[in-house]
Amino acid sequence: MTTATTTATKTAAGTPAEVTDLDVEFAASLPGLGPFTAFRLVRIEGAEGLYALRSTGDEVRVFLVDPSTVVADYHPRITAGMRAEIGADEDAVRMLVVANPSEEGVFVNLRAPILVNERTGAATQIIFEDTSYPLRAQLGAA
């Protein structure tokens, strides 16, 4: 597993800088993506906070988005135990959500974010029991 080709650091404003390319490894496959666990996370040029997560053999591609770039007031509690699953401290964890484009618009899954250790590429998907986070939130909906 390799680290990011552009190290993810904090900007002068204190917000995380974007990761450009990172090899990502999940301990278990994501629902619907079995048996794949090894992926490459690639930032999509010209689209702030948007990434493609591709299996290492390019068989599977999923779009991920940094929720802070598209959803106001989304601040789920990420516990030390959740960070420990990927061996990350607070400064090394990146939270992304799955984005699903459709004819009706783009929907994101806010109940099951993906946590990525920006230093090692270790990743996991957290599923919150809190139903206030929707499985399918439409971006741009009032």
Image (cartoon, helix red, strand yellow):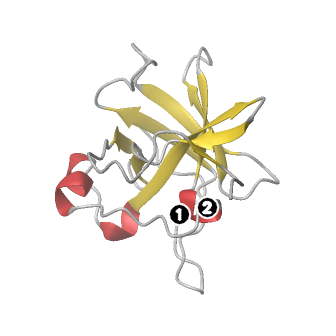
Secondary structure of the residue carrying tag 1 is loop
- Quadrant for residue 93, please give it: bottom left
Marks 2 and 1, the one that precedes in the sequence: 1
Q: How far apart are marks 2 and 1 (CA)?
A: 6 Å
Residue drawn at x 64%, y 63% is 69
Q: Do the residues labelled 2 and 1 touch (CB within 8 Å)?
A: yes
Residue 67: mark in rendering: none
Tell me which amino acid carries mark 1: Ala
Q: In this view, does 82 lie to the left or right of 38?
A: left
Which residue is nearer to you in this view: 107 or 116?
107
Position of residue 22 in the picture relative to residue 115 (left or right): right
The residue that disc 1 covers is: 8
| Residue 64, above or below 118 | above
Quadrant of res 140: bottom right
In the image, is residue 49 above or below residue 131? below
Which residue is drawn at the image coordinates 61% and 61% (left, top)? 18
Q: Which of marks 2 and 1 is in front?
A: 2
The N terminus lies in which quarter of the figure? top left
Q: Report which residue position mark 2 lands on.
A: 18
Q: Residue lying furthest left in this view? A: 81
Question: What residue appears at the point 57 percent right and 64 percent down from the top-left corner?
Answer: 68
Amino acid type for the residue under numbered disc 2: Glu
Q: Position of residue 39 (x, y in %)?
A: 50, 30
Comparing 117 with 101, the one in front is 101
**Residue 33 shown left or right of residue 106 in the figure:** left
SS type, badge 2: loop
How far from the left and from the top, in percent, is residue 11?
59, 79
Percent coordinates x, y for residue 76 in the rendering: 36, 62
Quarter that holds the C terminus: bottom right
